[in-house]
Amino acid sequence: MNQQTRIILPSICAPISMFTLRPLIIGVLLSCLPAAAQDLAQRLGFPPGTKLVIIHADDLGETHAVNAAAIKALEAGTIDSASLMVPCPWFPEMADYAKSHPDADLGLHLTLTSERIYYRWGPVASIDKVPSLVDPNGYFHHDWEEHQQINAKEVETELRAQVERALRMGVHPTHLDSHQYRLIMSGKDLFDALLRVAHDYSLPIFVTRDWFAGHPYLPSSLGPEDLVLDHTVTIEPEVPPEKWDDFYVDALKNLKPGVTEFVIHPGFDDEELRAATRERSTWGAAWRQRDYDFFTSDRFREILAQEKIKLITWRELARLWKAKIPPLQGQ
């Protein structure tokens, strides 16, 4: 493995000849995955054609306003899954919640960047063990610049430190996913580091077939033991606030059969969250309030009923996954 990973941004194109070969390559790789990975809904006991959805809240632990909104939605039953950012200042609040609510479907939102300007966090591992991951002040980098050198061994060290801290603080995660998709979309070495950690702790990871065409190393790294979701939906900055609800309604009404994860970012638009996210509106306080408002609305519940969409959780998927894979670290 080349441990010094060169970050290639999605906008950087492969040679033209690869575009000709890519459909064939992806087809071959997909054919190597087990058939069971292609009928996940049926493996969960649902008939063919069933539309299953995970409504997943990201970024818990980032601020109290995010925690409070997510907890309220989780307890109302409209958001059914979430993941926690272990390095963030408000993670201890969510760790306490996880201990007192052992049935809550909570994973870890593995974090390697600190994207805000004034509200920062750094690694769980000692800085001297992960120097490529931090800036001169010891925080995670705001961003990974094009061709920035990120050491894959250091990434794995930090991922394990985050999982271990969560376990020590009483969190028993149901799954792993990646903040800003850094571990998914930054090359094979980092994705393989994520897979090793997931396998060692007997945890499924959030990966979907929607990403395979753009990142051919994903299906080549995945094995027959790995769960793969069918689709994912997340809102993007180009959607104007007045079209927010329409985006989600259209996505739900046009949902394909199989398992789809909606990645959302609920939060309360209060003084704390406005201050933490004040440098830009994307994934800011108002954005997160809009997500919270839609996914706790009567309209959302009505569409689920009208479209015969069933909500599931990562706990159900993890149970299916662990039935195939024996625990490796006493989970």
Image (spheres, grey):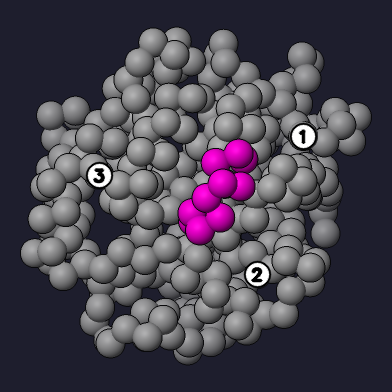
> What crowding class fits label 2: few (fewer than 14 Cα within 10 Å), some (14-19), or many (20 or more)?
some
Tell me the amino acid under the disc marked 1: Val
Amino acid type for the residue under numbered disc 3: Phe
Q: Which label belongs to residue 242?
A: none
Q: Nearer the viewer, mark 3 or mark 2?
A: 3
Q: Pointer 3: residues within 10 angstroms few (<14), some, or many (20+)?
A: many
Q: Secondary structure at mark 2?
A: helix
Q: Quadrant of the N terminus?
A: bottom right
User: Which residue lies under the disc numbered 2?
Assistant: 221
Specify start and end residues of the magenta stretch as a single range. 95-105
- Residue at image position (49%, 71%) is 317
Name the quadrant of the C terminus. Answer: bottom right
- Spatial separation of the CA atoms under disc 2 and disc 1: 27 Å
Q: Residue at x 62, y 77 (%)?
A: 322
What residue did someone put label 1 on? 124
Whichever of labels 3 and 2 marks the residue nearer the N terminus, that label is 2
Image coordinates of residue 69 in percent, x first then y, are 37, 33
Label pair 3/1, CB-CB below 8 angstroms? no
Q: Amino acid at mark 2?
A: Ser
Percent coordinates x, y for residue 49 in the rendering? 24, 82
Residue 216 placement: quadrant: bottom right
Q: Measured from the top left, where is residue 266 in percent x and y?
A: 36, 35
- Give the residue displayed 62% in from the left and 84% down from the top: 324
Q: Which tag, 2 or 1, sits closer to the chain's start?
A: 1
* Residue placed under numbered mark 3 in the picture: 295
Local secondary structure at mark 3:
helix
